[in-house]
Amino acid sequence: MTKKQTFTNLDSWLLDIEKHGAIEVELMVIGNKSDMVDCKNKPEVTATDIAEFTKRTGIPIYLTSAKSGANIDSTFLKLTDTLIEKTKLNINPGNEPLRL
């Protein structure tokens, strides 16, 4: 949120993931330091930048603050839910009821 250059580097990092990462990796971007953005401190990364990135890549961006704890739990719960659903589909590709 506070450094445009870091946000701009995302495209390079995505290429590295594509080149060296697993085939079916789950991606999300966590924008930290959201607590530093207020009326006095304008963010270098704007809501428009975030929307354009998400539209272009399909990768969600979650804004958090490690300092205040804002959105930390909900962001990791969202990632956990996404991974659980993905695992269910891999275990049960036909979407048949799972019998435990």
Image (cartoon, rainbow, N blue to C red):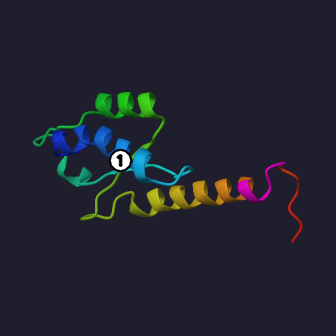
- The quarter in which the C terminus is drawn is bottom right
**Residue furthest front in the image:** 19
**Residue furthest left in the image:** 40
**Horizontally, is 7 left or right of 14 in the view?**
left
Q: Is residue 38 visible?
A: no
**Residue furthest bottom in the image:** 100
Residue at figure coordinates x 80%, y 56% from the top left: 92
Q: Is residue 41 magenta?
A: no
Residue at figure coordinates x 48%, y 35% from the top left: 58
Check the image and report above or below for 1 versus 70.
above
- The quarter in which the N terminus is drawn is top left
**Quick one: 45 or 53, which is closer to the camera?**
53
Which residue has dot 1 on it? 16
Q: Amino acid at mark 1?
A: Asp
Magenta segment, prevailing SS (helix, strand or loop) = loop
Secondary structure state at the residue bearing disc 1: helix
Residue at figure coordinates x 52%, y 52% from the top left: 25
**Horizontally, is 81 left or right of 36 in the view?**
right
| Residue 80 coordinates in the image, percent (x, y) | 55, 61
Check the image and report above or below for 18 versus 55.
below
Would you call the spot at circle 1 few (<14 residues within 10 Å), some (14-19), or many (20 or more)?
few
Segment tinted magenta in the rendering: 90-94
**Horizontally, is 46 left or right of 82 in the view?**
left
Check the image and report above or below for 52 versus 13.
above
| Residue 32 coordinates in the image, percent (x, y) | 27, 54
Q: Is residue 52 visible?
A: yes
| Residue 86 coordinates in the image, percent (x, y) | 65, 54
**Quick one: 77 or 95, which is closer to the camera?**
95
